[in-house]
Image: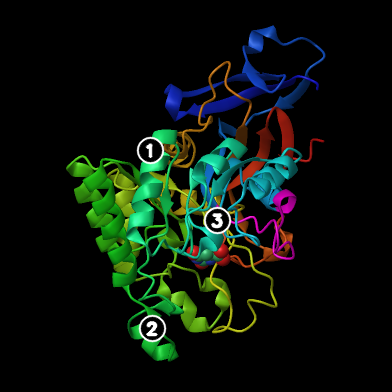
């Protein structure tokens, strides 16, 4: 592989406290001292670009095995690359679920060829059914990096406790989709909007009851838990309070909860339906505050591809929206343009911080670090769903103008997304 030398680029690495113009040399998949470059290197003029550590997305549905009309490992990783994401955690609600070592190995093997690093999340219960625990040790030996029954929260609290204890011993995170299963099944946020639409709502209490349980378990047993896609003000308040008393809880929210509210579903467009649902303006502002004060540690997408046919009927459509290609741009637009976070703080929430939660490499531009990085610039662009790189087009940011754009992504030292037209 040829060396890559990027000149005159703004190097923004919050983990290394760096924000300066300089050069970067990439050799054999590693970030190297640029003074080692020779004339054989492939040179990129970085003028006007910012280089940052590759994004780490803690919450992605790749649909492979089993639902590859929606997405597959390779297409999902192409979408990741186009969004600056170089590492992702792939959720286990595939068909079959990721509940055997064979399925773990299948994903890891296919991912070797992919444009992003894929870390596999193993299921806590067989078939995500909350009936029988998986053999976590066997899944771990096969290569899982985290545990979750995402989307189908573990109903049996004792089984959840066992998983949390085993995960703590193995030093992998448990990531929890917090939702009381008996209050689940709504289509949109419960309240005036669900009433206006005449559809069943998802109450805040469903998420908050789940959040309260996972915090209580983490506190009682002295083990960590990671709370997925926080969407209500009171969930954030519970996490804030738990952190203040030393509970080992971390949390993520998603760009759609930062930019959009339940008003979007009044259009009866199922691309705005996801679980948890878009909430109120008050909740949206609470998510921003929680990110700013450190209550929420990371931004993840919950990239959930579904085909246009599946999304055609507003009420019958499955929950979920895609997000990896727009996550940085959307978060930048709300948080940096809105004056809430600096660019460095945003990048930390999308790289070093999630990497630390998942205990995986990433989040650094230091010499010797893996060459996983992306380049962006401030640029207004309008999201065209048809121009996105994944298989599904169900983006809630469609036709929105965002104010930063990923221009180049390098993963394992290789250019995996070229938005500059240099290849
Ligand atoms: O909106 C969602 N989509 N929430 C989930 O919990 C699951 C996900 C999916 O797999 O489509």
Q: Is the CB of mark 2 within 8 Å of ligand 1?
A: no
Residue 198 location (% of width, % of height): 43, 91
The foreground one among 414 and 310 is 310
**Quarter of image, res 222:** top left
Which of the numbered marks, if any, corresponds to residue 402? 3
Write the start and end of the magenta stretch as one range: 60-75
Relative placement, left or right, of 365 versus 206 is right
Distance of label 2 from label 1 (alpha carbons): 41 Å
Disc 2 residue crowd, few under 14, some 14–19, many 20+, Cα 10 Å: some
Q: Earlier in the sequence, mark 1 or mark 3?
A: 1
Q: How many marks?
A: 3
Relative placement, left or right, of 21 versus 115 is left
Residue 347 location (% of width, % of height): 47, 38
Distance of label 1 from label 3 (alpha carbons): 39 Å
Q: Which residue is mark 2?
A: 193
- Assess whether residue 74 is covered by the magenta stretch: yes
Residue 316 location (% of width, % of height): 57, 83
Relative placement, left or right, of 247 versus 19 is left
Q: Which residue: 41% across, 61% down?
A: 154
Disc 3 residue crowd, few under 14, some 14–19, many 20+, Cα 10 Å: many
Q: Is the CB of mark 3 within 8 Å of ligand 1?
A: no
For the C terminus, give its image quadrant.
top right
Q: Earlier in the sequence, mark 3 or mark 2?
A: 2
Q: Which residue is mark 1?
A: 168
Q: Is residue 242 visible?
A: yes
**Quarter of image, res 294:** top left
- Assess whether residue 372 is covered by the magenta stretch: no
Which of the numbered marks, if any, corresponds to residue 420? none
Q: Which residue: 31% across, 59% down?
A: 211
Disc 1 residue crowd, few under 14, some 14–19, many 20+, Cα 10 Å: some
């Amino acid at each position: 592989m040829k060396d890559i030398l990027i000149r005159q680029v703004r190097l923004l690495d919050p983990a290394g406290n760096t924000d300066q113009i300089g050069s970067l040399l990439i050799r054999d998949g590693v970030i190297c001292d640029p003074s080692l470059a020779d004339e054989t290197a492939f040179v990129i003029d970085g003028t006007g670009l910012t280089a940052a550590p590759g994004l780490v997305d803690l919450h992605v549905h790749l649909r492979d095995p089993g639902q590859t009309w929606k997405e597959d490992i390779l297409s999902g990783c192409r979408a990741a690359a186009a969004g600056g994401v170089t590492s992702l955690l792939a959720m286990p609600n595939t068909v079959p679920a990721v509940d055997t070592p064979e399925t773990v190995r299948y994903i890891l093997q296919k991912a070797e060829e992919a444009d992003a690093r894929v870390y596999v999340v193993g299921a806590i219960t067989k078939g995500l059914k909350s009936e029988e625990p998986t053999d976590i040790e066997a899944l771990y030996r096969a290569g899982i990096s985290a545990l979750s029954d995402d989307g189908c929260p573990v109903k049996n609290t004792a089984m959840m406790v066992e998983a949390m204890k085993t995960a703590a011993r193995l030093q992998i995170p448990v990531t929890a989709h917090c939702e009381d299963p008996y209050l689940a099944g709504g289509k949109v946020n419960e309240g005036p909007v669900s009433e206006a639409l005449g559809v069943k709502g998802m109450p805040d209490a469903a998420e908050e009851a789940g959040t309260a349980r996972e915090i209580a378990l983490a506190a009682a047993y002295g083990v960590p838990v990671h709370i997925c896609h926080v969407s209500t003000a009171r969930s954030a308040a519970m996490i804030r309070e738990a952190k203040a008393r030393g509970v080992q809880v971390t949390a993520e929210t998603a760009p759609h909860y930062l930019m959009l509210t339940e008003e979007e579903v009044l259009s009866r467009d199922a691309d705005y339906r996801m679980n948890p649902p878009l909430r109120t303006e008050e909740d949206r502002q609470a998510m921003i505050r929680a990110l700013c004060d450190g209550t929420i540690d990371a931004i993840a997408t919950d990239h959930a591809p579904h085909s246009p046919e599946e999304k055609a009927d507003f009420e019958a459509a499955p929950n979920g929206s895609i997000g990896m290609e727009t996550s940085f741009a959307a978060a930048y637009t709300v948080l940096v343009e809105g004056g809430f976070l600096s660019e460095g703080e945003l990048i930390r929430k999308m790289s070093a911080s999630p990497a630390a939660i998942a205990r995986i490499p990433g989040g650094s531009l230091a010499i010797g670090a893996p060459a996983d990085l992306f380049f962006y610039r401030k640029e207004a662009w309008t999201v065209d769903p048809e121009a996105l790189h994944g298989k599904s087009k169900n983006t809630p940011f469609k036709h929105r103008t965002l104010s930063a754009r990923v221009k180049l992504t390098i993963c394992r030292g290789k250019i995996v997304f070229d938005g500059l037209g240099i290849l």
